[in-house]
Image (cartoon, helix red, strand yellow):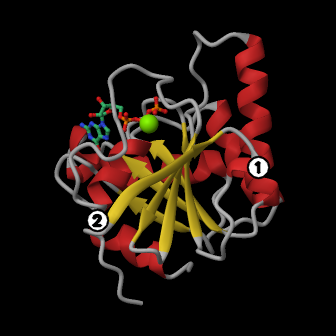
Amino acid sequence: MEINTHNAEILLSAANKSHYPQDDIPEIALAGRSNVGKSSFINTLLNRKNLARTSGKPGKTQLLNFFNIDDKLRFVDVPGYGYAKVSKTERAKWGKMIEEYLTSRDNLQAVVSLVDLRHDPSADDVQMYEFLKYYEIPVIVVATKADKIPRGKWNKHESAIKKKLDFDKTDDFIIFSSVDKTGLDQAWDAILGKI
Ligand SMILES: Nc1nc2c(ncn2[C@@H]2O[C@H](COP(=O)(O)OP(=O)(O)OP(=O)(O)O)[C@@H](O)[C@H]2O)c(=O)[nH]1
Ligand SMILES: [Mg+2]
């Protein structure tokens, strides 16, 4: 499929089902810990500086943000999990919002699950991966911030992440960096392979 990635815009932000777009355009959602680089991933793939707003301030993205790409594909930026300074009530609201989207959205083709290449996945990362596997949602694991560790150590970190996740070999695993664009083509190939 030919997609003009320059033709991208934020479409809408949704708190629940009633706000989701009503059509058959395929969606790829981005999930991961707060600050892992979900919004940066979207910006890098679309070659835009700040279309999906990023910040050093975790917990910034509060709603599901839908990005329209050339009317052929949507990215859904999901608020990050695992941010300590969030109240129990907020956390529960977040859980409901994500669960509703992931378990009921027919448009959803795959989830890009972002983890930090430098660290072992957190308990939340493992839980998210298990959740996606349980619901049989195709997963593209993207290990980001690769620019922060030497290339010679990438393999070791990849193995540690896969082991901790009990990684399913039928899923994609991509080493990525929004800073130097490592993995950009692979990420697009994986996404286009799901839609
Ligand atoms: N070095 C490096 N920094 C990155 C990379 N990706 C993101 N960052 C930085 O990490 C911080 C968080 O990035 P975001 O893209 O806002 O993270 P997020 O996952 O969208 O965070 P929330 O919206 O809070 O869930 C920012 O300061 C980014 O510049 C990367 O590949 N390499
Ligand atoms: Mg974000």
- Who's the residue at 37% across and 47% down the image? 144
Q: Quadrant of the C terminus?
A: bottom right
* Position of residue 104 measured from the top left corner of the image (x, y, whole percent): 82, 58
Q: Secondary structure at mark 1?
A: helix
Q: Depth check: 159 or 170 in front?
A: 170
Residue 17 visible in the snapshot: yes
* Position of residue 89 measured from the top left corner of the image (x, y, whole percent): 77, 14
- Left or right of 188, for residue 193: right
User: In the image, what residue type sits under mark 1?
Assistant: Ser
Establish if 36 lies above or below 30. Answer: above
Which one is in front in this view, the residue at disc 1 or the one at disc 2? 1
- Left or right of 133, for residue 23: left
- Who's the residue at 56% across and 20% down the image? 83
User: In the image, what residue type sits under mark 2?
Assistant: Leu
- Who's the residue at 29% across and 47% down the image? 146
Residue 130 visible in the snapshot: no
Q: Quadrant of residue 24?
A: bottom right
Q: Depth check: 156 or 25 in front?
A: 25
* Sequence-first tag of 1 and 2: 1
Q: Secondary structure at mark 2?
A: helix
Q: Dots 1 and 2: beta carbons under 8 Å? A: no
Task: Report how far apart the C-alphas of labels 1 and 2 lie in the structure.
Answer: 33 Å
Q: Which residue is mark 2?
A: 184
- How many neighbours does mark 2 have within 10 angstroms: few (below 14), some (14-19), or many (20 or more)? some
- Ligand 1 located in image quadrant: top left
* Position of residue 166 measured from the top left corner of the image (x, y, whole percent): 68, 54
Q: Quadrant of residue 175?
A: bottom left
Q: Depth check: 157 or 1 in front?
A: 1
Q: Depth check: 183 or 39 in front?
A: 39
Q: Quadrant of residue 181?
A: bottom left
Q: Which residue is mark 1?
A: 18
Q: Quadrant of the N terminus?
A: bottom left
